[in-house]
Amino acid sequence: MRKYLIGLLIIIGLFLSTTVFFVTSFLTDIDIYSESVEIGDVRVIGLAYYENEDILTLADQISLGNSQYKQGVYFVNISDNQSSKYIENLRIHIQDYSNVETYFRVKIIEQKTIKYTREIETENGVFTVVTEVSKLMEEPTDLNFETSNWYDNRAVDGYFYYTQKSIRSSASEPMEHELISSYFSEQFYSAEPANYSLQIGIIVEAVQAGEYVEENWGMETPPWGGNW
């Protein structure tokens, strides 16, 4: 059997389109890489959803135009509290397809953006130009991350750690873990101007339980204490 260490990498970058549609944005595609070592099959992925009336819908990936998308980078509405894609409806689930006991950790990368639209008149007509720029974020977005079986180590290395060994439910069904399952019960997100939005990317790193954790993550013991 084989183990595949799956990591999702965010590249903070700059996307330029130099035609009539000009966009500058800062979260680009998430790439997937694998490293093969002996024993086990390790595969854990992160997904973002919108939840409305108890129904989950996969979140929209950020469009680059021309039917291209930032793979694994999701759109979150932060300006219209009536939108089905509003931040209070955001959910993040981690799906474990591994056939061996696995530890995993999750990093959330986020970037607020501001979009400006203007008309430019040329000899060929009037064109709409859209410019999207990043907004300085002094603090991370206030999201209701789960605490049961999760350890928040963001102050040290930027990750949330799932503290239990995980393995898929069956050969055809993943084990699903919720990192965000609701918004704060008695709190509302203060809507921002209409041209603001949020882009969220999810990094998931997983490794087979046992000596492989220290070998791959360089950690003798879990950040929450005890032993792996």
Image (tube, rainbow, N blue to C red):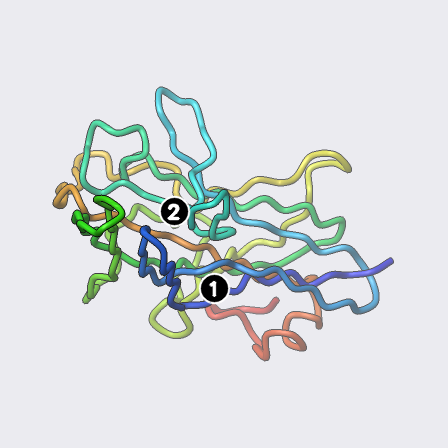
Foreground residue among 176 and 10: 10
Q: Residue furthest right?
A: 1
Residue 33 in the image: x percent, y percent? 65, 64
Image label count: 2
Q: Residue furthest top?
A: 53
Q: Indicate the amino acid at tag 1.
A: Ile
Q: Residue furthest front?
A: 123
Q: Quadrant of the N terminus?
A: bottom right
Give the residue at mark 1.
10
Tag 1 and tag 2, C-beta contact below 8 Å = no
Foreground residue among 62 and 66: 66
Q: Quadrant of residue 22?
A: bottom left
Rendered view: 197 above or below 155: above
Give the residue at mark 2.
146
Q: Is residue 24 left or right of residue 96?
A: left
Residue 221 in the image: x percent, y percent? 56, 74
Q: Is residue 201 left or right of residue 162?
A: left
Q: Secondary structure at mark 1?
A: strand
Q: CA distance from mark 1 to mark 2?
A: 23 Å
In this rendering, the label closer to the viewer, 1 or 2 = 1
Residue drawn at x 44%, y 60% is 28
Q: Secondary structure at mark 2?
A: loop
Q: Is residue 111 left or right of residue 163?
A: left
Residue drawn at x 39%, y 62% is 15
Q: Earlier in the sequence, mark 1 or mark 2?
A: 1
